[in-house]
Amino acid sequence: MSVTTLFTGRSPADGDPVTDIYRYAARKGVIEAVEVAAEDLGLSLREAHEAVANLVESRLLRVDDSEGRRFVPVDPELASASLVSSVEREIYQRRELIDQIRERMGAFRSEYGDAGRSSAASAVEYLVGAMEVRGFLKMAGDACRDEVLAMQAAGGDVEDLSQMYLTLLARGVTVRIICQHRSRADVSTRMLLKRLTDAGAAVFTVSHVPRSAVVFDRALVVMFGVEDDGEDDGEASVARVHNHGIAKFLLDLFNHLWETATPLEGVEVGYANVADDLQQAIASLMAKGYTDEVVARKLGMSVRSCRRHIAMLMRDLDATSRFQAGVQAARRYLGAAG
């Protein structure tokens, strides 16, 4: 049992074997045998031995013989000073290690920067692997001062980034998020989004977001699920973009989606507020001849949910085929828009 175990649970109280054993030792002045202490206190031998081991590790008991059977109590103030000293020493050593790591890595920073500036592809850098991606996002979040604009193509992205968003909001940074409509139907994602809106984030939804991306302070762009070979093997990866033109394009795309998106309000929202928008998107994809599986994937919903919407659409239009329903619906929505 580690030293921290003694201090991370409930407070010592009567009936706790650790407290009872220490009180017994303080009263007697010594524990001659754990078996005797256990019998006197009505504890099982196992409970007594575990309590003694805990107290020894916590410096509140000291072994007083060569056989390890006799224990004497230690003044809690002395035990505390001893423990704090060891913890402080460990903290100092870890801080020293952190400084060494930063100093060592800093020596390579200029080399990396010089190589990046001399490369034609320096505007885009690829980071692969959960540790590298997580470290970069922390750096980007820590450096952000004013605004974060996020496009979330899938619910998992919201979950992965939610803590960063909450930290930014607590610092007064503006956070605006565009998700897919499917986020309204997923209970866990919806509750997560409620935490963000309660903290001050503005969350809107649209039918389809092509890829997840985050723009920090309208300058640094991070695109998710992108690797330098164009393949996405499922491992965490991002593209870090420093190019002003690309940042401007992402900002324009975000603003366009924002103007057509529907605000997420409350928890019990479901698809009710976006039914027409969702059916229009489904109809458009059906008219292009996409299969149910492709339509579902593009809209970020399950195939089962997608087929339910398609069936409702075909019934409302009295269509005999998916293609016919798609064309008729597309014409209807086009006419309504005109």
Image (cartoon, rainbow, N blue to C red):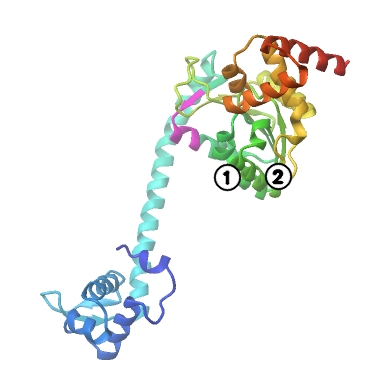
Asked whether residue 114 is drawn in magenta, I would say no
Q: Does dot 2 land on a helix, a strand or a loop? A: loop
On the image, the x and y values in percent for residue 53 come to 25, 70
- The mark nearer the N terminus, 1 or 2, is 1
Question: Which sits in the foreground, 120 or 10?
Answer: 10
Q: Does dot 1 land on a helix, a strand or a loop? A: helix
Q: Residue, x 48% and y 16% (percent of image)?
A: 231
Residue type at mark 2: give it.
Answer: Glu
Residue type at mark 1: give it.
Answer: Gln
**Placement of 221 over or under 318, stated as above or below:** below
Q: For this view, does 325 lie left or right of residue 298? A: right
Q: For this view, does 215 lie left or right of residue 255? A: left
* Label 1 vs label 2, nearer the camera: 2
Residue 246 appears in the rendering: yes
Task: State the separation of the CA atoms marked 1 and 2.
Answer: 23 Å
**Placement of 147 over or under 250, stated as above or below:** below
On the image, the x and y values in percent for residue 187 come to 61, 42
Q: Which residues are magenta?
A: 126-135
Q: Are marks 1 and 2 in contact (CB under 8 Å)?
A: no
| Residue occupied by mark 2 | 268
